[in-house]
Image (tube, grey):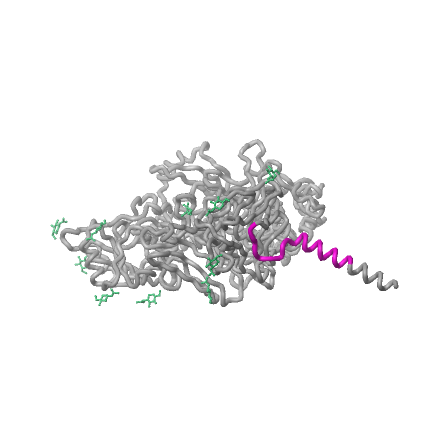
Amino acid sequence: MISSTMMAMTQLVTQLVFLLVIFHYSIATDTLNPNQPLRDDQALISGKEIFALGFFSPGRSKNRYVGIWYNKLQPAGQKTIVWVANRRSPLSGTNGSLELNGNGSLTINSMIFLPMPMVALTNPVAQLLDDGNFVIREANSSEFAWQSFDYPTDTLLSGMKLGWDLRTGLNRNVTAWRSYEDPSPGSYALSIDLEGIPQANFWSGSTKKWRSGPWIGIQFSNAGEQPSNYGLRFDFVHNKDEVYYMYNTTGTNFVRRALVDQSGKVKDFVWIERTGRWNHFLDYPINDCHEYSKCGPYGVCNLDVWPICRCLQGFKPKSPQEWPLMDTSSGCDRLTALDCKNRSDGFMAVTIAALPETLSTILYTNISQNECRDRCLKNCSCTAYATANISGAGLGCVIWVTEIIDLRMSPNPTQDVFVRLAAADLASISNKSSKKSQSKSVVLIIVFSMVALIIPLIYFCSWGKKKMIHKDVRGNGEFELAQLQWSTLMEATHNFAKTNILGKGGFGLVYKGKLAEGREIAVKRLSRNSTQGIDEFENEVTFIAKLQHRNLVRLLGYCIKGDEKILVYEYMPNGSLDPFLFDKEKGDHLDWQTRFHIIEGIARGLLYLHQDSRLRIIHRDLKASNILLDIEMNPKISDFGLARNFGDRETMIKTRKVVGTYGYMAPEYALDGVFSMKSDVFSFGVLILEIISGQRNRVFLSSPHLYLLGKAWRLWNDGKGLDFLDPLIGNSFSMTQVMRCINIGLLCVQEKPEDRPIMSSVVIMLGNDDAPLLEPKEPGFKAIFSPKHDAALNQNELHTFNDITLTEQTGR
Ligand SMILES: *[C@@H]1O[C@H](CO)[C@@H](O)[C@H](O)[C@H]1NC(C)=O
Ligand SMILES: *[C@@H]1O[C@H](CO)[C@@H](O)[C@H](O)[C@H]1NC(C)=O
Ligand SMILES: *[C@@H]1O[C@H](CO)[C@@H](O)[C@H](O)[C@H]1NC(C)=O
Ligand SMILES: *[C@@H]1O[C@H](CO)[C@@H](O)[C@H](O)[C@H]1NC(C)=O
Ligand SMILES: *[C@@H]1O[C@H](CO)[C@@H](O)[C@H](O)[C@H]1NC(C)=O
Ligand SMILES: *[C@@H]1O[C@H](CO)[C@@H](O)[C@H](O)[C@H]1NC(C)=O
Ligand SMILES: *[C@@H]1O[C@H](CO)[C@@H](O)[C@H](O)[C@H]1NC(C)=O
Ligand SMILES: *[C@@H]1O[C@H](CO)[C@@H](O)[C@H](O)[C@H]1NC(C)=O
Ligand SMILES: *[C@@H]1O[C@H](CO)[C@@H](O)[C@H](O)[C@H]1NC(C)=O
Ligand SMILES: *[C@@H]1O[C@H](CO)[C@@H](O)[C@H](O)[C@H]1NC(C)=O
């Protein structure tokens, strides 16, 4: 009796639950029929339950959009949206409905939002397929009358075409969302452009940021050295009907998506089953040399030398004053003008990574290399020629009729380009190269000049002799670290006028200067009687000259005259991050987007220092005042005076001399003098929390509860993370992003170094909204208040110390 009642009840409950699930979980079907609208609380699920289509709101936004997302791959419960139907026209309430009309047109609340089939269908159905394509077709046919793949938003999925249907004029490109909460088209776009030889271009508004180069059979020529294609199939179709790029993951066992995101990058994501998250493994542009026309006309970009730009042989920098100072975009000029009429010109073979930009080219198919050369010689506009196996054209000859740009060097260059040169220049080149292989000698000159620069400094510094260094450390080339004349710098800074002082750097005053040609510079003058400063000076020259990254400040040149030792940097119009965060009077408050951009930039700069550069460097003095901001508010890490290079095997160093800045110092370093990459990670975590809160991490020894890390930790645990946010940020921020940043900040400041993430994980966690995050453990601030430390500092309140870099003298 009892058991049968129980059974009845169980059945009832099961049915109820089932009904609830059905009700909540939408129509568990993949098709939409006419007059069966899809309501806001319903979703279509593709046959194998891979994709779902329905209504969603991005981030904190209340707007409703119709979109497609991965049905099961939802890291941390977050939808990964791959397509948005009404990206420009959101709905305001949850009363929306998606409907298929009897003639085969889709409407949302009776409005048409995308171009729909031109011809009315008689018996239409709409279906969500397992590749993420939403299609409309006649019920009795498999041919698509319309498909969402023809109207991509910011994501390119396997099987989606990027490019043109020339018959209909349809141009499929992917455009970033405006922000994480607004899917309407932003400024970054990836498109296939037909001008010249078709290629993919990455745009920021109307500025080209990167180009893929023409397709050469297996990949785009300028796409960089692909580590492996992991079984992916890439296709580029170029015929009279269509020009498009497509990839195909069928036959591999992983899920991949390509995304153009708000930060101005083309990103590749792969789903990692083991970790249950998206891993982001390639960014375009990949590095500085991939930036469009980085070195200007006839300039070659090579990451393996410093500076990375140099002129082709037979050319000289167009503006010699600018060139050593790294403004290389003006490029190079011929040493000797061409002499077309006399037919005396010849060609120099250059082997580079990919064809130069092909916008102004003439393409001849099916001609020999000799014929190609003749056609170039006959045309007085021709500057270079090359042969290449170009998709859609076969083995062809390319002739450039303007200056050639976007030349890139790689470890294994494969593309020969023949550059037209005047006879005189060719003769002098062949004279030189008869002695040495030309490309080698260029590298050697650079290596020699670096050694020549560093050896005298070391000599000078370690012996401390008052000896003038007259030696011109420049080699014969025109592209070394510039040695500037004392008189030039005196002039540029008005004799180091007090009014030109920008601030105090690690080892001396920093002045603003202006060179005769108008370029602004920052001039760091080593204090004359600072012995410790000499070490830092040497440090700075050694490290920073070898490092190049968009998030590190650039050293342009130096000057040594008598006791004077001077470093010249690019000028950062926006100064340091410190006043932007902490000077509440300043008025230039940073919005959330900018703050996030700054956090990401610092993370990338630090990742480069720790892992990606040829050296392995620990900065040791990361803090807001050492982050400089350029005109576009891009952050640049500066002040390498305390930086240390780590050997390949070393993971940590113990020192008796603790240097750095209180407030940013990791506990194990402040207390025991042990530093490692993880102590930089700690400082970075403090910086994140300062950037979010707009408050300094003051060290009030008397009142630990005021300590910023403690405050962040308390609010986080109380679930009031948003209370930590700087009120000056206002209302336009992404809540998920803020919470992620606090989470990451707290992970970085954990007490135990081994708990803190390495920078590559930090970059992935920041760049990928879907990456799951660990729960942080308590920050390492308690140790700071240990009696030992208190006694050592013998001071009650130390907040005045916060922005003072402790040097080896003042350290304990
Ligand atoms: C949906 O609701 C909004 C307000 O929430 C209203 O403005 C709109 O007219 C409604 N649309 C329909 C189709 O009922
Ligand atoms: C289908 O119907 C909608 C409105 O009901 C109309 O706007 C559209 O033009 C029609 N399409 C065709 C191909 O007739
Ligand atoms: C589909 O049905 C329509 C009429 O509803 C008919 O005209 C058409 O021929 C059919 N197509 C196929 C492939 O059966
Ligand atoms: C992807 O490749 C598979 C075979 O590996 C093929 O069957 C399928 O049609 C391809 N998809 C597209 C969209 O070309
Ligand atoms: C992308 O496509 C749209 C529509 O076809 C077009 O208006 C826009 O100019 C394209 N953008 C680029 C960068 O090609
Ligand atoms: C050119 O590339 C295609 C693949 O796109 C290849 O099939 C063909 O053999 C190549 N031709 C030559 C001459 O290398
Ligand atoms: C052609 O060459 C001759 C001698 O080789 C030279 O004198 C003359 O200036 C050249 N003509 C031009 C247009 O450069
Ligand atoms: C290429 O040129 C050769 C001779 O110059 C000719 O025999 C051949 O048919 C041409 N091929 C094509 C595809 O035009
Ligand atoms: C020479 O180059 C120009 C472009 O500057 C082009 O218009 C012209 O057709 C070319 N001449 C020949 C013979 O190919
Ligand atoms: C090349 O070298 C030869 C002798 O080694 C010399 O006579 C000639 O003038 C040189 N030419 C140039 C252009 O430097």
Instruction: For the N terminus, give its image quadrant.
Output: bottom right
Q: Residue furthest right?
A: 1
| Relative to 330, residue 588 above or below | above
Bounds of the magenta segment: 12-34
Depth check: 16 or 676 in front?
Answer: 16
Depth check: 767 or 665 in front?
Answer: 767
Judged left or right of residue 664, residue 449 is: left
| x then y, percent, for residue 715 | 69, 44
> Could one spot residue 677 in this view of the protein?
no
Judged left or right of residue 539, residue 562 is: left
| x then y, percent, for residue 591 | 55, 39
Q: Is residue 13 magenta?
A: yes
Q: Is residue 776 magenta?
A: no
Q: In percent of the image, x 62 and y 57: which residue is there?
A: 28
Depth check: 753 or 251 in front?
Answer: 251
| x then y, percent, for residue 457 | 42, 52
Depth check: 587 or 377 in front?
Answer: 377
Judged left or right of residue 188, residue 487 is: left
| x then y, percent, for residue 213 | 36, 56
> Could one spot residue 147 in this view of the protein?
yes
How many marks can you see?
0
Judged left or right of residue 538, residue 712 is: right
Q: In percent of the image, x 24 and y 53: which residue is there?
A: 383
